[in-house]
Amino acid sequence: MLLKIHPDNPSERKIQQVVDCLKDGGIIIYPTDTIYGIGCDIFNSKAVERICQIKGIDSKKANLSFVCHDLSHLSDFAAQFDKATYKVMAKHLPGAFTFILKANNTVPKLFKSKKKTVGIRVPDHNVPRSIVQLLGNPILTTSLKHNDEILEYATDPEFIYEEYHKLVDIVIDSGFGDNQPSTVVDCTSGEMEILRQGKGEL
C-alpha cells in the first residue's frame, strides 16, 4: 500500500499502522533525510532475508545499517568505543551520516553470520525516528540504489511504489526524497575515515 505520512507532523495512527506491519514481519520503504530507504524490524530474520533477496545480496555479507531514534541503543549493538567518537556522533546526529562501528556479540546472532561491524543511522527526519521510537528497537535499513548508483525513481514515492509494490508491504509517501545518500564514516580503527562522501559534511 502507498501510505501518505506528513514529514514534519506524522500521524500517530499511521505510524502505528507501520509499526504493526513491521512487527508482523513486513517490509517498508520509507523517507529519510537523504534518499528513500527499505527496512524491516531487525529482530525478524525472515524479513531481513526478504530484503536481501529484493536487493540481490547475501545476508551474511551484506553491509546493512540500523536506523535508531537516538544514540541510546548504541550499547545494544556496538562494542565499546572511545569518548571522542561518541562526541563526533552526538554532534552530527540526527543527520545525514552512517557511522560504522565494531559490532558486539548481538549483531552476528541477528544475521547468523560473523559480522564484525554495524552501521548506525539516526536520520534527521521525523517519520523514521517516530517509527523506531514506537517500535522500541531499530529497523534494519538499506538504500534504494543499484550498484551504488541512485535510481531515477528513488526520489519519487509514487514511482517507487510502482516499482516495488509487489515486493514490499508499505511504501510511505512523505514527498520527494533527496538524491544524495548519507556520508559513511568508518570509526572501527580509532581514526575517522570517510568511506563515502554523501550529503553529510563531517
Image (spheres, rainbow, N blue to C red):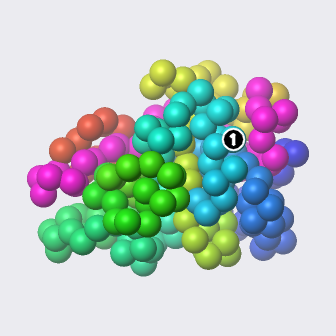
Q: Nearer the viewer, residue 197 or 64?
A: 64
Amino acid type at image mark 1: Arg
Q: Residue furthest right?
A: 1
x then y, percent, for residue 68: 50, 65
Frontmost residue, 109 versus 171: 109
SS state under label 1: helix
Q: Position of residue 183 (x, y in %)?
A: 35, 43
Q: Nearer the viewer, residue 120 or 174?
A: 120
Stretch of the chain drawn in magenta:
163-192
Residue in the image at 45% along x and 48% along y: 113
Q: Examine the rendering and report whether any part of residue 128 can be seen.
A: no
What percent of the width, then of the height, locates residue 96? 41, 50
Q: Is 172 in the magenta? A: yes
Give the residue at x 52% y 34%: 58
Name the main secondary structure of what is drawn in magenta. loop
In the image, is 44 to the left or to the right of 164? left
Above or below: residue 73 compared with residue 118: below
Residue 185 visible in the picture: yes
Residue receiving disc 1: 50
The picture places residue 3, in percent across and down from the top left corner, at 83, 51
Q: Measuring 34% from the left and 65% from the top, which residue is drawn there?
A: 104
Circle 1 residues within 10 Å: few <14, some 14–19, many ≥20: some
Q: Is residue 91 above or below residue 27?
A: below
